[in-house]
Image (tube, rainbow, N blue to C red):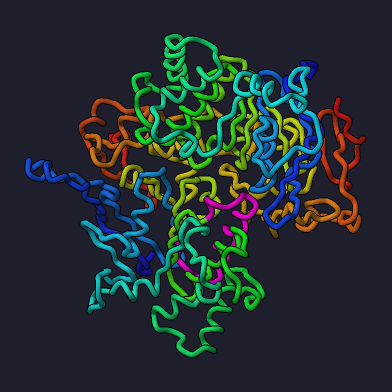
Amino acid sequence: MTPNPILEARELHTYFPVPQSLFEALMRRPHLSVKAVDGVSFALMRGETLAIVGESGCGKTTIARTLIGLEAKTKGEILFDGKEVALRDGQTAIGLQHLRQRAQMIFQDPYESLNPRATIFDIVAEPLVVHGLAKSERERTAAVATALEDAGLRPAEHYFMRYPYELSGGQRQRVVIASALVLQPELLIADEPVSMLDVSIRAEILNLLRDLRQKRGISVIFITHDLSTVAYFADRIAVMYLGRIVEIGLTREVLRDPQHPYTKALLSVAPAPNPRLRRKRVILQGETPNPINLPNGCRFHPRCPVAFDQCKIKDPQPTVLSKTHQAACLLLEK
Amino acid sequence: MNEKPLLRVRGLTTEFATSEGAVARALEDVSFDVLPGKTVGLVGESGSGKTTTLMALMRLLPASGRITKGKVWFNDTNLLALSEHEMRDYRWKSMAIVFQGAMNALNPVMKVGDQIREAILLHDLMDRSAAEKRVRDLLEMVGIAPARRDQYPHQYSGGMRQRAMIAMALACAPDILFADEPTTALDVMIQAQILQLLKEIQKALGLAVVIVTHDLGVVAEVCDEVVVLYGGKVAEYGSVDRIYNHAQHPYTQRLLESFPDINNPSETLASIPGTPPRLTQLPPGCRFEPRCHVKINRCAEVSPPLLEVEPGHYVACILREGKEANFQ
């Protein structure tokens, strides 16, 4: 793979400070922080779809928001098309405004991410206005119509003057997608784009995202907790646990030959739509620990079914399993 | 299948008055059985009438809704013929419900243990000290340390709140447990924990369970029988194995195809174009007709009767053959 990646994260950290009371400040108690993203590195190639999978609280949404500049990173680097993401443009840097023209985000909840008092036309045209593109009425109408049709809302004119409340959940999510597409982005970051939708509509939206990627060569970061959706959609999978990527690899490598005990457990509980496949499940006890006080050693050891003594002391580093497959577990380091 | 059903739902029909003055027929002619110790899954999309079915069975429909037809036999009593006062003896003691959205169903300003105790004391089952012991036993049964009885719901995680809701539903030792989307909004791992817990409790107490869900994976995992609802009517009803491996209704078939299978990822997912019907403007024929991929002209005119295509497997589609369902 010689072509340069469209997006690269290097040792990315995003911490959120925990507010201190006056008393705690006076007592000089240490400042605590929620370590939502704690050292994540990956590269996304052009035209590739990378799924980031994990449970709530693993930091997957924070990563998405950090990549697009909605949260400030604490440490690390983000490179977009080889240039570092910064506040303003520079010789080797790309400013947030330009980044957001070329990278767009699709949010989870189509019921909350649309302005209820704006028409569909205004919603989809807003990114053009914000970025000062398509200044004439005609250009704007054409751009909005194309975006709506690309998102599967045909004929587009039929939707221009309607309001979000008139649309179904699936149609609303298409409007959200259209307003991301109107800037013709090179990268889409989709945060659980189908989790709020009914099963029969989910498939339509997933097929739409897939077509867009194939026809336009858009790169996609797809964030989800549902491994079964990913199986059909992504080129590569990154599994996150408590702010770290614990395993990353080609979809078939991760699904057919998972190496990290957390990935194995997640796979074993993924729903299979067939009662004949009721399997032996690895159900982890307890819940994801709180990312303020991370466990020592491997952060997965308190819930790990195969943990041994070393796991409490040593933080595992990623082990290279193949050119494309890595996992961070002490059992693999031996 | 010779065991006598605990609950027999027959021809249940409900209507809701909408604010525009129209009548929404949320359920029409819904029939199914619940056998002791077995699990029935009610599956369908939003608006298909899953939750309405549970609420109608508990006789907890909101003021705008009423049951216009049908019978609900609990053993040999028709629950719909009881007075409100008599119904209270069945609610919670014979059939209990775990409401949707455990996050919001608990009282935020009351200790969790007190809420469970309230359910016990309200039904006059035992004195305070015995009730207190029962609260601790129940918490332990659902995997919550009894020491946490004095905490408030916000101190619980989502999975624990769902466990507490289950403990509350079990407070009066019911025969049937209704669970409305018990795992929606929970992470996959917590979802697996809750389903495992439900199965364990069911086995230990011999409970019958009715689960409402839109998640076909959940149904495949825990149910014995499945009722597929579409637009307020039963589209298909049968054993979980027949439904998943020999679905006869075009809606069920498409629904199963649109569910991504991790073991067998396909190139494209089947999707069902269009949206479920509005309950105030139901199509005259089959309710699925506007979205159906195998429809014929007659589908738009005739409302399909529920046919028994093989013993215990019912389908509402005129393209199938069988004798008309005749529930005892």
Foreground: A249 or B174? B174
Foreground: A145 or B126? B126
Residue A81 point in image, percent of width and height? 34, 71
In which quadrant is the N terminus of chain B drawn? top right
Query: Residue at coordinates 92% horizontally, 35% vertically from top-left?
Result: B323
Residue A21 point in image, percent of width and height? 16, 44
Residue A120 point in image, percent of width and height? 55, 72
Give the answer, above or below, for where B85 lies relative to B68. Answer: above
Q: Which residues make up the magenta segment?
A: A194-220
Give the answer, above or below, for where A329 lies relative to A78. Answer: above
Give the answer, above or below, for where B205 lies relative to B104. Answer: above
Residue A106 point in image, percent of width and height? 46, 62
Query: Splitting the image into 4 quarters, where does residue A279 fall?
Result: top right
- Residue A214: in magenta span: yes
Foreground: A119 or A29? A119
Query: Residue at coordinates 86% horizontally, 34% vertically from top-left?
Result: B308
Q: Is residue A321 visible?
A: no
In which quadrant is the C terminus of chain B drawn? top right
| Main SS, magenta residues | helix
